């Protein structure tokens, strides 16, 4: 799986730090005026980050209204357990993310979920077995 999102600072991306991702590949694309970085998790999944110097933050996404428009909604990360959801949530908050919905029982049976907005303005969901 590969997911792409935006970042204001490639080396200090909250998602990179929270999930122990390593830089697999980095490229500056002058034609499009942005830098992209592929981050790799030891298990094989990837996160692709884009950075453009003059990009401005968009309005923070809201878990309750994200589906009211077409296009990007959020990035969902699956955690192995409810404890991992709580630990990653705390780690992301420590890295500057804002908690929108704290770890809570999911509408799906036996699952815990939460929503955060990372420092780059990306809406993140954590889901794990509860």
Image: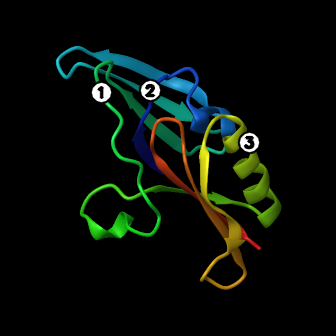
Tag of residue 8: 2
Residue assigned mark 1? 55
At x 68%, y 39%, the residue is 18
At x 28%, y 20%, the residue is 54
* Disc 1 + disc 2, Cβ < 8 Å: yes
* Disc 3 + disc 2, Cβ < 8 Å: no
Disc 3 secondary structure class: helix
Provide residue 16's location: percent of width, then percent of height.
Answer: 60, 33
The answer to whether 30 is drawn above or below residue 37 in the figure is above
At x 26%, y 64%, the residue is 69
Provide residue 1's location: percent of width, then percent of height.
Answer: 48, 51
In screen coordinates, is 22 left or right of 46? right
* Disc 3 + disc 1, Cβ < 8 Å: no
Q: Quadrant of residue 72?
A: bottom left
Tag of residue 91: 3
Q: Quadrant of residue 96?
A: top right
At x 77%, y 74%, the residue is 130
| Mark toward the start of the polypeptide (3 vs 2) | 2
Mark 3 to mark 1 CA distance (whole Å): 26 Å
Mark 1 to mark 2 CA distance (whole Å): 8 Å
Mark 3 to mark 2 CA distance (whole Å): 19 Å
Q: Quadrant of residue 49?
A: top left
Tag of residue 128: none
Disc 2 secondary structure class: loop
Regarding residue 46, the answer to whether it shows in the image is yes
The residue carrying pointer 1 sits among few (fewer than 14), some (14 to 19) or many (20 or more) residues within 10 Å by Cα, namely few
The residue carrying pointer 3 sits among few (fewer than 14), some (14 to 19) or many (20 or more) residues within 10 Å by Cα, namely some
Q: Say which of 72 and 48 sits in front.
A: 72
* Numbered circles on residues, count: 3
């Amino acid at each position: 799986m590969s997911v792409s999102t935006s970042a204001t600072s490639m080396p200090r991306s909250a998602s990179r730090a929270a999930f122990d991702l390593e830089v697999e590949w980095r490229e500056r694309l002058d034609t499009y005026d942005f830098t992209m970085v592929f981050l790799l998790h030891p298990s094989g999944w990837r996160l692709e980050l884009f950075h453009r110097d003059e990009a401005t933050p968009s309005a923070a996404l809201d878990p309750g209204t994200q589906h009211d428009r077409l296009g990007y909604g959020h990035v969902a990360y699956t955690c192995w357990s409810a404890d991992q959801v709580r630990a990653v949530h705390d780690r992301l908050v420590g890295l500057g993310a804002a908690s929108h919905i704290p770890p809570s029982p999911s509408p799906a049976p036996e699952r815990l979920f939460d929503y955060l907005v990372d420092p780059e303005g990306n809406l993140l969901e954590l889901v794990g077995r509860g």
